[in-house]
Image (spheres, rainbow, N blue to C red):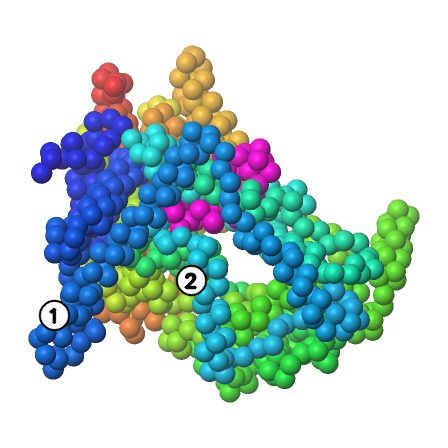
Amino acid sequence: MESKSGRFPFPFQPYPIQESFMEALYTALDQGKVGIFESPTGTGKSLSLICGSLTWLREHEEKKKEAAKLPDADAEGLPKGDAEKEAKNCTEASEPDWVSEFVQKKAERDMVNNLKDEELKRKKREERLEMIRHNAQLRYAMKRKTGEDDETVKLMQLSKEGAESEMRDPEEEGLIVAEYESDEEATPKNRLCDDDDDEDLEEDHVTKIYYCSRTHSQLAQFVHEVQKSPYGDTVRLVSLGSRQNLCINPEVVRLGNVQSMNDRCLEMQKNKHEKREKAADVEPKRRRGVAKATCPFSGFENLMSMRDEVLVKVRDVEQLLQHGRETNTCPYYSTRMSIPAAQVVVLPYQTLLHASTRKASGIKLKDQIVIIDEAHNLTDTISAIHSVEMNGAQICRAHSQLSQYSERYRSRLKAKNLMYIKQILFVLEGLVRTLGGKVGQNPNTQSCQPGSELLTINDFLFRAQCDNINLFKVQKYFEKSTISQKLCGFAEKYEGHGINTQSISRNKENRHIAGLERYLQTLQNKPTVASEQQVAVEVKPTMASPMMLVESFLFALTNANKDGRVVIQRQGCLAQSSLKFLLLNAAVHFAQIVQESRTVIIAGGTMQPVADFKEQLLFSAGVTEERILEFSCGHVIPPENILPTVLCAGPSGQQLEFTFQTRDTPQMMEETGRVLSNLCNIVPGGVVCFFPSYEYEKRILGHWESTGVLQRLESKKKIFQEPKKANQVEQVLGDYSKCIQRCSNAECGQTGALLFSVVGGKMSEGINFSDDLGRCIVMVGMPYPNIKSPELQEKMAYLDKHMPHVDGKSPGKALVESLCMKAVNQSIGRAIRHSGDYACMVLCDHRYSRTGTLKKLPEWIRSSTRTHTSFGPAFASIRKFFLEKRQRPSL
């Protein structure tokens, strides 16, 4: 066996903890484990994940190559156990030995033949990609054969339905749902056609790594690490994103809203297919109206070309956009076409963790590797992705659109379609009824009795009088009929009429005249209903049809009764009242991922407390203790480079305790100001102060301003505050950084800068306060979540009922403490970013000194933490820490 340092190619000499990380990762991948990997921020976690996993993937592919060359399945490298398992499934225990032996030999031969087929495909793919690398001109086979047009002409000449189709508006044809058959009614022939659709045109999925993280910036950072790694020139990597991130069509991009962009893009794709079909018509028909828009960036040849070019060179989303613009090719569709042949697929949380989004993106997890990074809040993330909220106005709009759709096309819809549409309308009536309103009336003028309720799924369905409706069949109908998309096209076609039966019958000329009248009125500065609606749209974009939201809500109601709750929130007006589905058991949706995947790696800077995480997510998803592999490492910095301090009292002796009862008192706020003022006197560079909430930050800063504390702080450090808007974060950070740099280079009254932030806000995750940007992190109080929140109370009650006690503590109480300490760990870990960095962390609250609370800190922080019951010794140790660092600057 090779030495550890030589086994994993690395761009530089790895730290010992990185070598240990990669060894443990390789073991988890090789043995098909579910790995929980904790590696503090700043220890090179991304590079360890890249080099460790790609080394395993390279060796795994080498074994498969070798196995494909061997004459039988007994040779080393071939999973013989799989052949035996397959053979056992094919024979009964009572069969004679010669039958069992024959079946096993056949299974082994089949496996070798499959491996050889895979090897041939791999060679062809690699040859094609190599040609692209050398800029060779490639020709791609088109989907249709050369003689297809001639064949279509003959078929159309034989068709007797041409006359009937001319009678119909071709624009309307695309809005009609096709004849529907439920699964039990479908014939085997129909099912076969669905399954075999274009199967010969798609490559088999190769073994790949799906890497996902929370934000697009984190994904881009990972891609840049891959580019710098030893695998940067050889790995086939594709970055996935939403249309909002990857669309290059100006007409779609200008819409801004994700839902509107999706709707417009899908409509253009539909128009493109219709255009192809019409091109085959023998006799040209008289054109009606304006030609439908199609996307000029989705040509098949260009997409196929970019599909392979994406795999040849590692690119992040920005580089994909640039390449797409240069070649006039859609990056959104070409990246999805690249998935089967890719070795690494980089994607956001939503795409991986949501089953229907996975399916729509073409992601197949069977026997693949899944790496979930920044997974400290994975349970909450899954719950948030699968929770759905909609208001009364949206439900009424969906009901109005569907009822008028049904009315307009009643004569052309088959009985099954009408039956399911009636069921959906009935359910929508029930949903509005639970909010205290009625359909068919303006939701803005309907009043409701204010209040909120929290119900189980079954109780909610009973309240809505929908408990006799089979929502699983309704869900299947939504999927197969694509009624939500049809309704979206219907709404767009007749927008401007208020979508009612009378206005639908008006022709297009009337619509254009109405639009011109509205335009002339705006020129005369006469406010109209339409102009007011337009302003509202600009403030908060609305979907053409909210039926997709309704579909998601109804799908959520198919969860088990114990796994979810419905919150009914009445606001006095039906339009503003809302229904929200809360997912209580995230493990339900995570189970499919861990069951299908070969290996799941859950990685993060701080994964503590792991016990709660395993209980709520892994064990509940059916993962056994034997399949779990845990790895946790210390930091790359020496212990003397950090000074975590629990501060129990302030300079005047006031005990620091930021409970809801005490934190608003003038004494507590003034004592906090004195603590911060003293720290600013001795800490060089930047100080980042975290408050438990925006509300408390506003209150304490207001008090400090009126009492002169802010002025005292300003004399030592220039003050910055976390912005409310996400697009202003970069600007504030840039100014904060420049100020610190200016103060360190010149003699001035101020010694740096002070940044006020909020735990869980824009500065507490994903922002690096390295070196002078974060020499001291101050945590004011303990950021416990709002215990009075109905959602949190329900989650606690659910855990108390279904989960065992851990360390003698109820799961509900443990959840609250875990949420608090995870937020703390994320915030204080922002300061240390590399081996030469140093920082002090001050936890201002005597409750941090409790043994159970200290245990929830990461080991690398906990081992160096010192608790001080009075301010004097704490202040002295912090001053000594920075004096030593100034005398012996880190290299």
- The percent coordinates of residue 350 (x first, y second) are 44, 54
Q: Quadrant of the C terminus?
A: top left
Q: Between 702 and 286, which is closer to the camera in this rendering?
A: 286
Contact between labelled residues 1 and 2, with CB atoms less than 8 Å apart:
no
Q: Which mark is residue 801?
A: none
Q: Earlier in the sequence, mark 2 or mark 1?
A: 1
Q: Is residue 329 magenta?
A: yes
C-alpha distance separating marks 2 and 1 = 40 Å
The residue that label 1 is drawn on is 101
Category of crowding for the residue at label 1, using alpha-carbon neighbours closer than 10 angstroms: few (below 14), some (14–19), many (at least 20) = some
Category of crowding for the residue at label 2, using alpha-carbon neighbours closer than 10 angstroms: few (below 14), some (14–19), many (at least 20) = some
The residue that label 2 is drawn on is 355
Up-down: is 242 above or below 770? below
Up-down: is 140 above or below 562? above
- The percent coordinates of residue 454 (x first, y second) are 47, 74
- The percent coordinates of residue 411 (x first, y second) are 73, 81
- Which residue corresponds to the image point at 45% horizontal and 41% vertical from the top-left? 308
Residue 829 shows in the view: yes
**Left or right relative to 847: residue 543:** right
Up-down: is 846 above or below 581? above
Segment colored magenta: 319-348
Specify the amino acid type for callout 1: Glu
Q: Quadrant of the N terminus?
A: top left
Specify the amino acid type for callout 2: Ala
Q: Quadrant of residue 281?
A: bottom right
Q: Between 645 and 701, which is closer to the camera in this rendering?
A: 645
